[in-house]
Image (cartoon, grey):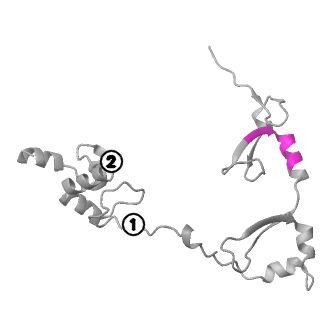
Amino acid sequence: MGQKTVRFSDLSGELITRDDTLARIVIHEHPELGDSPVEIEALADEAAAIEKAALRVAVVEIYFPGEDEPRRVTMEAAAFDELAADRPMSELLLTARPARAARRAKAAAAPRSINYDTLEHAGEPHKGRITEAERELVRDHLDAINDRLVTQGLRTIDPDDPEHAARYGLTGLAVAKAAQGG
């Protein structure tokens, strides 16, 4: 027995009969939208109508003196272009300097990077690559590091776990401990 998937346009409710008429639409900004983008499916003709009805806009950030955060404004491009009284906006944009990185507010400053090559942080779960220095610390101080990880409520390092053994170069460590009676 087979299954058949039936798709309908999220916009009109019309049946989508062929994949070549299916358009994926990702919504990044909308007054009713939460924090992250969402996607819907629609007929390609409906998506083309969205593109045709699209406004030409300028999205700008305004940094007022004494304010930590900029104000983000979206306005019609034609209205923004009219603000350039001295010369055309196209010329102004071509000759403008690249934007410099925004200064972060003190409260929103990024945390300092963690050095996993120290006993204080070696063995903590992280996405970065494991350096030889971190491997060596874990191999030489496994019990102390596992005690710290337990205290911090983090997963411990198990030399019998093939992933941990490979990640920290612990292959053979369990065998050596067993041979020593530990």
Check residue 26 for magenta coloring: no
Residue type beneath disc 1: Ile
> Residue under circle 1?
114
Decide: is 177 above or below 1: below
Q: Nearer the viewer, residue 133 or 149?
A: 149
Q: Is residue 180 left or right of residue 53?
A: left
Residue situated furthest bottom in the rendering: 86
The part of the image, by quadrant, that contains residue 70 is: bottom right
Decide which of tag 1 and tag 2 comes sooner along the chain: 1
**Residue 181, percent from left and from top:** 6, 45
Q: Quadrant of the N terminus?
A: top right
Q: CA distance from mark 1 to mark 2?
A: 18 Å
Residue situated furthest top in the rendering: 1
- For image coordinates 71% across by 43% down, the residue present is 39
Q: Is residue 144 left or right of residue 124?
A: left
Decide: is 10 above or below 138: above
Is residue 38 something one can see in this rendering? yes
Identify the disc placed on residue 160.
none
> Residue under circle 2?
155
Decide: is 94 above or below 120: below
Number of labels in the image equals 2
- For image coordinates 19% across by 59% down, the residue present is 141
Q: Secondary structure at mark 1?
A: loop
**Residue 20, percent from left and from top:** 78, 37
Which residues fall within the magenta stretch? 40-50
